[in-house]
Image: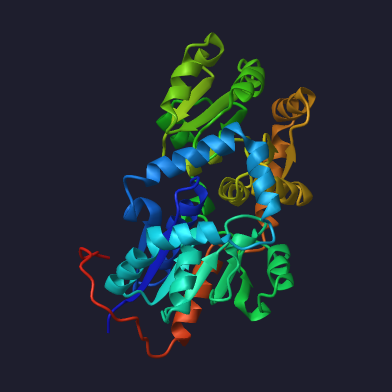
Amino acid sequence: MRKKRILLLSEGFGKGHTQAAHALSVELRQSSSEIITRVIELGAFLHPTIAPWIFSAYRRTVTSQPKLYGMLYRNHYHKKLNRVAGLALHRLFYSQTKAVIEQLKPDVIVCTHPFPSIIVSRLKRAGLSIPLFTVITDYDVHGTWIDPSVDKYLVSTPEVRQHLTDRGVPEARVEVTGIPVHPNFRQEHSKEQIRREFGLKAMPTVMVMGGGWGVFKKEEKDQLLAYIANWSERIQLLICLGTNEKARRQLLEEEAFRHPNVHLIGFTREIDKLMDIADLLITKPGGMTCTEAMAKGIPMLFYSPIPGQEEKNCEYFQEQGYGQMITSPEMIDHWFKLLIEQRPELTKRRSDIRSHQKYRTVSCSAAIIQYLMQLDKRTYIKSSTTTPLIQW
């Protein structure tokens, strides 16, 4: 008997959707040796030439015109994808996605972004019988996520489940699992070893993240980063810039960011380790970053949420007592003084945040595995294709 195959489809609009897919992939494979997985960013996989242009245009819109993005988000909050956008997805992805599925023959398809979920849903209406799971990677749900062809939604909170059922999704099709994070974020590493590895000191430490792309707008750099850099004699700063090497070079041109207690960190796969060192996280409220920080128990301060899903994420984490929105420089001063003068109390707060979490790291994978166990005989769409063979 062959192993069960799970195809995870994401999209490259930000990093969180694909991070969730990879986290779930790892958890599924660790949960059962009888499961194999494949993660695909559909746009980049099928259209490697044009996809970077689309993602770049999206990033420019979100970062330079957040009010416009927020207006579009709110105006279509209760709506499915409009007809023109749906037609564009159909022409770009439909037949090729069908060919990919025919070749891989997965037992379950899991989508962590609404676009592949829309495409697979349409294939299901045309006869595809493979179960479709959709993992919502924020603490709110936009109308583009919703489609009657989705067999099961895995969501972050009971509030998101309620939003779905209010819009007609049957309760039996929604399960509250939390957002999947990589198992590394559930482990505690040796702080001494991490400090040696990254050249860090044993002193109060604040981690700053610029969203999935490591992007800080000019006003954020001039105001937020410059302000917190004034604390570098007493606070160690880990400023994470991801793949944004241009921003790293620009900051290094300023004397304040060449201080020995200021560390400008480029792309790394060890954010989980750095979070173990950090006593406080200053971040944009992306769903994945905040969930990872919650798993580590780090108190958070939020800045510049993108209108739409990040605003909703910010509201949720503030309501839960896991973080606060930065409303003034005095709030930064307050938290930094707490960190210097009452560090043991903040350390205890980490334990409180971890203990208050309601969902286990394996909840998403367990829901999928349970569904697999209940499946009977599989049938697939059948047609010939000339697309090159894709391997698991």
Residue 48 in picture, x, y percent from top left: 32, 48
Residue furthest bottom in the image:
377
In the image, taking residue 141 as reference, residue 90 lies left or right, namely: left
Q: Position of residue 65 (x, y in %)?
A: 62, 34
Name the spot of residue 155 as percent of width and height, x first: 61, 65
Residue at image location 65% in from the left, 60% down from the top: 141
Residue positioned 41% across, 37% down in the render: 268
Quadrant where the C terminus is found in the figure? bottom left
Could you say which is closer to the camera, residue 233 or residue 164? Answer: 164
Q: In this view, does 163 lie to the left or right of 205?
A: right
Label tally: 0
Horizontal relation, residue 217 to residue 18: left or right: right
The quadrant of the picture occupied by the N terminus is: bottom left
Report the residue at 55% width, 62% height from top: 83
- Given the current orientation, which residue lies at the most extreme top position? 255
Q: Is residue 390 visible?
A: yes
> What residue lies at 38% left-to-right and 46% top-to-bottom?
51
Q: Residue 179's x, y, as percent?
A: 57, 59
Q: In which quarter of the image is residue 62?
A: top right
Considering only vertical position in the picture, is 382 above or below 52?
A: below
Q: Is residue 26 visible?
A: no
Q: Is residue 246 above or below residue 19?
A: above
